[in-house]
Image (cartoon, coloured by chain):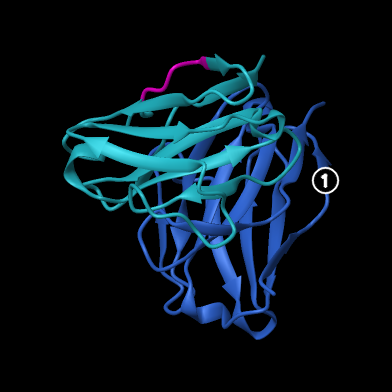
Chain colours: A cyan, B blue
């Protein structure tokens, strides 16, 4: 199972919106509404930000939103803040009843 | 509150074995599966597999069969990851992550355990 494809880096100024893409296949992203997104600050545990494509866990800011079209899922961060600077990973359930993570995207707040 | 507390860092020689623990608290252990995720130095997250905490049945991702074993001790709400015949490329941070209701919904994570394999 190959990793899902994400851009290596995305940057934006405070207050702006950015979008991170996550491209898979019809056997993972495109086949199931089980795409999740995780925020990972180095040295800390990853944090679930979005599950089932667009659902936010309790306590996660509504500045984070998720969507999916075909084989590509997206995470949008609006009103970018300094604390959003981190690595972000998507993940998807697969037709093999396994899970696969994306390659990861480093978000930089300029 | 839900917590997953992992065992401390390990330094091992090539060929040795290591067992990482993940102690759960704050919820009914058997109600949520437990996943294992690896992050090698400078690399991304990699899903290793999961164990059904109700049945004890493990599922391993490609690339994590043979030397990797998931196990449980339900009496102490603890999941284990054992790696045998360690290689330098096993050097990584290993995380346990609780599986919530939806597939891929890893809602709580352990703090990570650094395993270093070096002669």
- On the image, the x and y values in percent for residue A69 come to 20, 34
Q: Quadrant of the C terminus of chain A?
A: top right
In the rendered image of this protein, does residue B66 appear above or below residue B77?
Answer: above
In the rendered image of this protein, does residue A71 appear above or below residue B18?
Answer: above
User: Does the segment drawn in magenta span residue A83?
Assistant: no
Q: Residue placed at 44% from the left, 17% from the top?
A: A7
Q: Which residues are magenta?
A: A5-9
Q: Residue placed at 70% from the left, 68% from the top?
A: B3
Q: Residue placed at 57% from the left, 17% from the top?
A: A12
Where residue B82 sits, quadrant-wise, is bottom right
| Crowd band around label 1 with a 10 angstrom C-alpha radius: few (<14), some (14–19), many (20+) | some
Return the residue at label 1: B9
- On the image, the x and y values in percent for residue A18 come to 47, 24
In the rendered image of this protein, does residue A21 appear above or below residue B83?
Answer: above
- On the image, the x and y values in percent for residue B58 come to 43, 62
Question: Which secondary structure class fits the magenta region best?
Answer: loop
User: Does the segment drawn in magenta span residue A8?
Assistant: yes
Q: Quadrant of the N terminus of chain A?
A: top left
């Amino acid at each position: 199972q190959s990793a899902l494809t994400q851009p290596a880096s995305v940057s934006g100024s405070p207050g702006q919106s950015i979008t991170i893409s996550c491209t898979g296949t019809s056997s993972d992203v495109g086949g199931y509404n089980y795409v999740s997104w995780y925020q990972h600050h180095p040295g800390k545990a990853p944090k679930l930000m979005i599950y089932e494509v667009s659902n936010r866990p309790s306590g996660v800011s509504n500045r984070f939103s998720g969507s999916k079209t075909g084989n590509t899922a997206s995470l949008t961060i609006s009103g970018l803040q300094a604390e959003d600077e981190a690595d972000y990973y998507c993940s998807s359930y697969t037709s093999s009843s396994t899970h696969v993570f994306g390659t990861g995207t480093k978000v930089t707040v300029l | 509150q839900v917590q997953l507390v992992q065992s401390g860092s390990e330094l091992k020689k090539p060929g040795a074995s290591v067992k990482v623990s993940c102690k759960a608290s704050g919820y009914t252990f058997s109600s949520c599966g437990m996943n294992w995720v690896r992050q090698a130095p400078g690399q991304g997250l990699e899903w290793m597999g999961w164990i059904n905490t109700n049945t004890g049945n493990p599922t391993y991702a490609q690339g994590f069969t043979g030397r990797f074993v998931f196990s449980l001790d339900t009496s102490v709400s603890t999941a284990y990851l054992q790696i045998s015949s360690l290689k330098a490329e096993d050097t990584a941070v290993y995380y346990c992550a609780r599986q919530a209701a939806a597939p891929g919904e890893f809602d709580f994570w352990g703090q990570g355990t650094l395993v270093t394999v070096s002669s």
